[in-house]
Amino acid sequence: VQHVETGLMILLGDWVLDSTQGVDYILGLRKYPEIMRSQIKNAIKTAHGVDALTSFSMTFNENQKYEVKATFQSGNQYYSLQKEVGA
């Protein structure tokens, strides 16, 4: 779960080792929700140890951030994540 949470906190272009990793919260927060959804799902799927994303939902909340709920598989175990993300 820690790798997934860390992946969700990386801003697009900020990681020195791979500038293609991260989520564009700054430009995509309100204007492009489908791109945001895709980037957030990709951040979860590509996190170290994640074998499969089994469920995903995302809503824009009153704090002008996204509430992400996801379930993913790592090995033989399933993990749930509920996190508020955004700039």
Image: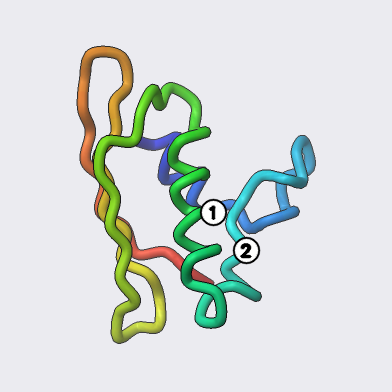
- Is the C-beta separation of discs 2 and 1 under 8 Å? yes
Residue 14 location (% of width, % of height):
72, 53
Amino acid residing under circle 2: Asp
The amino acid type, in three-letter code, at marker 1 is: Gln
Q: Is residue 56 left or right of residue 39?
A: left
Q: In the rendering, at what x and y percent does residue 39 appear?
A: 54, 54
Q: Could you say whether the residue bearing mark 2 is in a helix, strand or loop? A: loop
Q: How many marks?
A: 2
Residue placed most toward the observer, 50 or 7: 50
Q: Which residue is most to the bottom?
A: 62
Q: Residues within 10 Å of mark 2 (few under 14, many from 20)?
A: some
Residue 24's label in the rendered image is 2
- Give the colour scheme of this rendering: rainbow
Q: Secondary structure at mark 1?
A: helix
Number of the label disc, if any, that sits on residue 39: 1
Q: Is residue 36 above or below residue 32?
A: above
- What is the crowding at mark 1: few (fewer than 14 residues within 10 Å), some, or many (at least 20)? many
Any mark on residue 76, and which? none
Relative to 8, residue 72 above or below: above
Quadrant of residue 61 in the image? bottom left
As drawn, the residue found furthest toward the front would be 34
